[in-house]
Image (tube, helix red, strand yellow):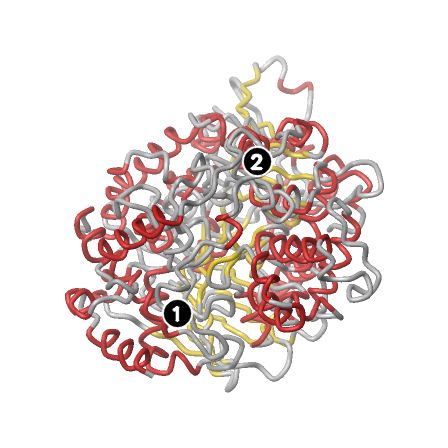
């Protein structure tokens, strides 16, 4: 087995039992790793009782999985998964950093975590030395403080175990902030200070298991590959290609800020009431001038370094450290909240990081609340005196904290935009649901599809198996570079999409096969492997439960807002065309082998070897 | 400097920590060159990240007085006549760790599997870490070749400080007042 360590760490937090699992090579080849393998493991272990499993209960499984290309393909990542407390389906949520590389060097392809600890716990891994430690002293701490303590403690522990080695480099750490501890459904699994596996709400899953953090250090080499010489030259080739992409290198995804808002009319402004703005001061050059204290920052092996370190150096918000902020956060805790200053935006980014909340889903729920406030549907009294006006940075920071600690209205909003909207609509009328810009419980990424200049596909979010996740969109043809069949490849090999999408496609297949020695072809991926993964994801999304289930077809929808014409900008008047959307949706169902309601056909599942999925799906839907 | 004299140019690697992107291509290149595999802990250059954003590539500075070489009771360390690099004799090295403690920057570390100490050998004069850093246009690591008549006029020892010390200075540059208590 090449490219894999060949074993998985199994940790049961209820019994404190630590063991190992091995998966047959056949399974690994079939599901590759990361998101693909997560789908299979979750289905295999809880598929039959999927609808009764509470994502925030002990029966949920938290998965931290590498892929065969992790550590080899430039840019390190790890995939976090489990039953999502947002969609009740499976989301493959990846985060950058060295964790995946360290884990493989420690001799594991992934970690499978079950049960629920009695008291705050910290999982410490140093090669085969695996230990569950008490984390009471760090429970309750915000992100940066948590990270600082764990780095220090981790190095001391490494030194204690192997004192003769010399200076130990910092171990790699995944952790949660107060948001995760308090089971906020938008909580992220955090890495470093500002990196987040945000989509899916897996920070809340960690919190529900009372798992504050995981520290890993591996002292070994990465697992053996099929052709090391070939892989080495591919690393060089990929880097050479990517060094040429100066746009990403220089500006990161933040280059999109002004562009998406002004040129493509697709950036959320004031909870998507508009998708256009003309604030030139909010362009990436102003971020560079005013808040960037470091212009190039990347993770393991990354030639692109799209991250930049940002901090306001003067004024009332000085000292708040975050990254660029990247495009998604420039939008979601910036324009979406009517915040148009790099300083205010960096400050709010630093707050979501420190509280351990997904910037996209967190910014989405803040914008939702602010629109309710604007319309008088949420009062100052209900918000304990917070004046939630657009652009009021302090007010948003205050509400965010209420959410992270589930105080007052924060407790309702901590359930995420969709669940909060359902609850508030009971008190205030159905109108509230119109302002929830989400799909299947997951906030829409900061790319609107009304103007069709950015995400041109009307079905992008509506038909995605990961809901509003902008990194996994439904797209035709199925083998298009933007289609989620392609993204499922990156999420399963566990590599960075941004480092992959500009490369000649052959390079990726070459990489995959020189690492694994398998002969996986493009045809096999798009014809069999990706559909297998996505159909499992689709099936569990439809099974759902226990608190929410998605209705076939009816919930494969755009948010109501996207049918409202854009009120401003060069594409004023544009909206999603319902007729076109419905035709496209039907076309997508058919291409995926789903019936007219979007339910995977029996023959589709059987052809993919998913007979069990077929049987259980039909049983559950009949109920 | 007693006991060590170089006949020709001295090669060394200068560092600009504030330019390090943290990409660790240097570690990858080093371990591929020396071990034939990607092996972060067996790399002679290691990037410490004690504070995110403040990455510190940590490698031998070829001190003028070579305290590690002098400290070795087994004569396992010597200085390469051509480059000034510290060369480890794997057969003689007992992995006792005395050189690690003698190093003002605690730069040497043991090979994670085999019993000998790891110290940068400058790849015989063509360091792979510098090559990839330059290729990426980071310029955090630069190769300097000094003529014999000039290299004794300054010290490279300023790089031989612990990762903590270097990080403390670096975060002050990056974050100013906000760096209080970061490390």
State the CA–CA distance, disc 2 to disc 1.
36 Å
Give the image location of residue A216, x and y in percent. 52, 62
Instruction: Return the chain for callout 2.
Output: A
Instruction: Return the chain for callout 1.
Output: A
- Residue beneath the point at 69% across and 49% down: A350
- Depth check, front residue: A372 or B71: A372
In the rendered view, tell whether residue A406 sits above or below residue A166.
below
Judge depth for marks 2 and 1 and give the one in front. Answer: 1
Give the class, few, some or many, for how many residues have Cα within 10 Å of label 1's Cα (few <14, many ≥20): some
Q: Is residue A62 left or right of residue A481?
A: right
Give the image location of residue B25, x and y in percent. 46, 38
Give the image location of residue A86, x and y in percent. 51, 66
Q: Is residue B109 left or right of residue A348?
A: left
- Residue beneath the point at 66% across and 32% down: A282
Task: Say which quadrant the C terminus of chain A sits in.
Answer: bottom left
Q: What residue is disc 2 on?
A: A254
Give the class, few, some or many, for how many residues have Cα within 10 Å of label 2's Cα (few <14, many ≥20): many
SS class, disc 2:
helix
Q: Is residue B14 left or right of residue A549?
A: right
In the rendered view, tell whether residue A133 sits above or below residue B56.
below
Q: Is residue A288 left or right of residue A578?
A: right
Residue B97 visible in image: no
SS class, disc 1:
loop
Q: What residue is disc 1 on?
A: A551
Q: Could you confirm whether marks 2 and 1 are on the same chain? A: yes
């Amino acid at each position: 087995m090449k490219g894999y360590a060949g074993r998985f760490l199994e940790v049961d937090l209820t019994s404190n039992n630590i063991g190992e699992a091995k998966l047959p090579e056949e399974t690994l080849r079939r599901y590759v790793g990361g998101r693909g393998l997560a789908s299979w493991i979750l289905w295999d272990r809880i598929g039959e009782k999927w609808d009764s499993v509470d994502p925030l209960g002990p029966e949920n499984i938290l998965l931290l999985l590498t892929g065969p290309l992790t550590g080899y393909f430039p840019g390190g990542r790890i995939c976090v998964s489990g039953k999502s407390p947002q969609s009740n389906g499976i989301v493959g949520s990846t985060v950058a950093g060295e964790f995946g590389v360290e884990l493989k060097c420690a001799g594991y392809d992934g970690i499978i975590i079950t049960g629920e600890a009695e008291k705050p716990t910290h999982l410490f891994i140093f090669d085969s030395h695996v230990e569950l430690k008490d984390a009471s002293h760090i429970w309750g701490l915000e992100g940066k403080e948590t990270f600082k303590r764990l780095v220090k403690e981790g190095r001391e522990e490494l030194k204690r175990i192997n004192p003769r080695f010399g200076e130990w480099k910092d171990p790699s750490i995944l952790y949660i902030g107060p948001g995760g501890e308090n089971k906020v459904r938008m909580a992220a699994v955090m890495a470093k200070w500002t990196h987040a596996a945000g989509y899916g709400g897996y920070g809340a899953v960690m919190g529900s298991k009372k798992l504050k953090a995981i520290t890993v250090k591996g002292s070994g080499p990465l697992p053996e590959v099929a052709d090391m010489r070939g892989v080495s030259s591919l690393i060089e080739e990929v880097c050479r290609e990517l060094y040429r992409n100066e746009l990403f290198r220089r500006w990161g995804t933040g280059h999109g800020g002004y562009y998406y808002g002004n040129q493509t009319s697709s950036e959320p402004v004031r909870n998507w009431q508009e998708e256009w703005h003309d604030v030139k001061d909010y362009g990436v050059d102003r971020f560079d001038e005013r808040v960037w204290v470091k212009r190039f920052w990347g993770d393991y092996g990354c030639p692109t370094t799209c991250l930049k370190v940002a901090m306001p150096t003067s004024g009332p918000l000085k000292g708040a450290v975050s990254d660029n902020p990247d495009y998604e956060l420039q939008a979601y805790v910036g324009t979406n909240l009517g915040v148009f200053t790099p300083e205010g935006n960096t400050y709010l980014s630093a707050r979501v990081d420190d509280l351990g909340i997904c910037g996209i889903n967190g910014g989405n729920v803040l914008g939702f609340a602010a629109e309710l406030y604007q319309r008088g549907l949420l009062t100052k009294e209900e918000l304990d005196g917070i004046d939630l006006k657009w652009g009021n940075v302090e007010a948003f920071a205050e509400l965010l904290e209420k959410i992270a600690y589930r105080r007052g209205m924060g407790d309702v909003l901590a359930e995420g935009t969709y669940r909060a909207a359902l609850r508030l609509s009971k008190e205030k009328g159905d109108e509230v649901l119109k302002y929830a810009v989400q799909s299947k419980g997951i906030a829409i990424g900061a790319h609107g599809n009304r103007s069709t200049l950015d995400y041109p596909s009307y079905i992008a979010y509506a038909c995605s198996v990961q809901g509003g996740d902008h990194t996994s969109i439904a797209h035709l043809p199925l083998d298009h570079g933007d289609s989620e069949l392609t993204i499922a490849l990156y999420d399963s090999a566990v590599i960075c999409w941004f480092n992959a999408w500009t490369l000649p496609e052959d390079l990726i297949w070459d990489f995959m096969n020189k690492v694994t020695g398998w002969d996986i072809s493009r045809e096999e991926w798009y014809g069999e492997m990706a559909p297998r993964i996505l159909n499992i994801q689709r099936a569990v999304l439809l099974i759902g439960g226990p608190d929410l289930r998605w209705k076939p077809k009816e919930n494969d929808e755009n948010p109501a807002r996207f049918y409202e014409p854009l009120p401003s900008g060069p594409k004023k008047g544009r909206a999603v065309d319902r007729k076109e959307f419905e035709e496209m949706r039907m076309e997508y169902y058919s291409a995926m082998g789903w019936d007219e309601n979007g339910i995977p056909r029996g023959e589709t599942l059987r052809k993919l070897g998913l007979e069990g999925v077929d049987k259980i799906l039909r049983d559950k839907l009949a109920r | 400097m007693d006991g060590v004299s170089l006949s020709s140019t001295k090669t060394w690697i200068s560092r600009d920590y504030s330019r390090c992107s943290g990409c660790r291509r240097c570690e990858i290149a080093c371990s591929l060159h020396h071990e034939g595999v990607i092996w972060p802990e067996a790399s002679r250059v290691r990037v410490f990240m004690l504070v995110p954003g403040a990455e510190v590539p940590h490698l031998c500075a070829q001190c003028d007085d070579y305290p590690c070489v002098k400290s070795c009771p087994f004569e396992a360390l010597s200085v390469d006549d051509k480059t000034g690099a510290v060369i480890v004799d794997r057969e003689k090295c007992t992995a006792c760790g005395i050189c690690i403690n003698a190093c003002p920057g605690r730069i040497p570390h043991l090979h994670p599997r085999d019993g000998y100490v790891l110290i940068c050998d400058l790849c015989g004069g063509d360091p792979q870490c510098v090559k990839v850093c330059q290729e990426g246009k980071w310029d955090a690591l630069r190769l300097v070749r000094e003529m014999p008549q000039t290299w004794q006029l300054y010290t490279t020892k300023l790089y031989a400080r612990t990762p903590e010390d270097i990080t403390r200075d670096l975060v002050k540059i990056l974050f100013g007042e906000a760096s209080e208590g970061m490390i």
